[in-house]
Image (spheres, rainbow, N blue to C red):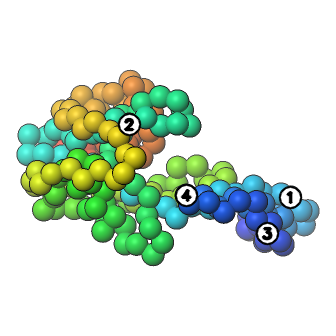
Amino acid sequence: MDFTEKTISTKEIYNGRIVHLVEDTVLLPNGKTSGRELVLHSGGVGVIAIDDDKNVLMVTQYRKPYDETVLEIPAGKLEKGENPLDAGIRELREETGYKARNFRFLGKCYPTPGYCSEIIHLYLASKLTYVGQELDPGEFLDVKTIPLDTVVRMVMDNEIFDAKTAIAVLKADKIIKENA
């Protein structure tokens, strides 16, 4: 069966700096129509940076939607048309102050496919060199260095809630163990 929904019409609700909200009317596979509220997003990038001693560079920052400080990998929004690897290099430098000699693509993830178009591109960074942090104006975070085994345990014990971080940590751990 073809599950494709054909868009009949789109109504713009809001167009902001980060998200664009629309309401689509779609034709369902059974011939009926339905509404879809969508959050259109330019996408993002996340970088799990691991040093030579298998420590992960993590950041903590306040996340307003959850009204709490969240532990996560360095990450950021893609600018329109920006190459995800270039964004990953930029975000790692801005947020942690590190550059990496090696970047490996870990894949992409759809954090909320039910209503949001965001795609997050994930990278593993290694061979790190500290060059100085360059936070964006209005960006406040702390950098923490945590052993990879501890971060894996935190994911498995549901102490890390951020999806991009959990995916990147588990993929990086598998890759490192397979190449040991």
Q: Are marks 2 and 1 in contact (CB under 8 Å)?
A: no
Q: Which labelled disc corresponds to residue 5? A: none
How far is disc 2 from disc 3 in space, using C-alphas? 35 Å
Q: Earlier in the sequence, mark 3 or mark 1?
A: 3
How far is disc 2 from disc 1 in space, using C-alphas? 38 Å
Q: Which of label 2 and label 3 is nearer to you?
A: 2
Disc 4 marks a residue whose amino acid type is Ile
The answer to whether residue 72 is left or right of residue 33 is left
Residue 170: percent from left, percent from top: 33, 42
How far is disc 1 from disc 4 in space, using C-alphas? 26 Å
The answer to whether residue 136 is left or right of residue 6 is left
Disc 2 marks a residue whose amino acid type is Gln
Label 1: state its secondary structure.
Answer: strand
Q: Which residue corresponds to the image point at 49% horizontal and 61% vertical from the top-left?
A: 43
The crowding category of the residue bearing disc 1, from other C-alpha atoms within 10 Å (few below 14, some 14 to 19, many at least 20), is few
Q: Which labelled disc corresponds to residue 18? A: 4
How far is disc 3 from disc 1 in space, using C-alphas? 12 Å
Q: Earlier in the sequence, mark 3 or mark 4?
A: 3
For disc 2, the marked residue is: 61
Residue 159: percent from left, percent from top: 39, 26
Q: Earlier in the sequence, mark 1 or mark 4?
A: 4
How far is disc 3 from disc 4 in space, using C-alphas? 19 Å
For disc 1, the marked residue is: 34
